[in-house]
Image (cartoon, rainbow, N blue to C red):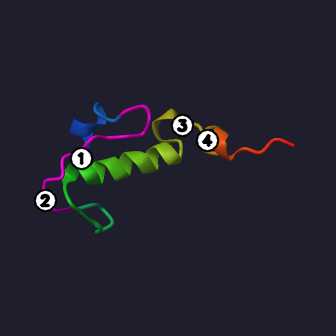
Amino acid sequence: QNDCSEFRSQFEASGRLSCTRENDPVRDASGKQHTNKCLMCAEKFKKEAQRGGQSGGTAQRNRLPTSERTYQ
């Protein structure tokens, strides 16, 4: 029931999933409640991306965004 496969193709490379704001509460596997399934999946995909998710890599995760880098 909490399978996010229908939203996976809509997940943008930039790490965003556009969701409606409809109120149709769902709970994830940990028991946390979300406003709707799309928002639950968006959070799930974001966490996957942050930990290297489907790419399997961690190089990007460990790099600071350009705006946060300091050059000495």
Q: Earlier in the sequence, mark 3 or mark 1?
A: 1
Report the amino acid beneath label 4. Thr
Which circle, 1 or 4, is nearer the viewer? 4
Residue 31 locus on image (x, y percent) = 28, 69
Q: Earlier in the sequence, mark 2 or mark 1?
A: 1
Query: In which image quadrant can residue 64 be found?
Result: top right
Tell me the CA gap for discs 4 and 2. 35 Å
Tell me the residue at 60%/44% (across/down). 61
Residue 9 locus on image (x, y percent) = 29, 30
**Residue ID for mark 3:** 56
- Element class at badge 1: loop
Residue 7 locus on image (x, y percent) = 25, 38
Q: Earlier in the sequence, mark 2 or mark 3?
A: 2
Which numbered marker is on residue 23?
2
Tell me the CA gap for discs 2 and 3. 34 Å
User: What's the magenta region?
Assistant: 12-26
Tell me the residue at 27%/41% (across/down). 18
Marks 2 & 1, CB-CB < 8 Å contact:
no
- Element class at badge 2: loop
Vertical placement of residue 31 versus 7, above or below: below
- Element class at badge 4: loop
Query: Is 14 positioned to the left or the right of 36 in the image?
Result: right
Tell me the CA gap for discs 3 and 4. 7 Å
- Element class at badge 3: loop
Tell me the CA gap for discs 3 and 1. 20 Å
**Residue ID for mark 4:** 58
Tell me the CA gap for discs 2 and 1. 18 Å
Instruction: Give the crowd class for mark 4: few <14, some 14-19, many >=20 residues within 10 Å.
Output: few
**Residue ID for mark 1:** 3
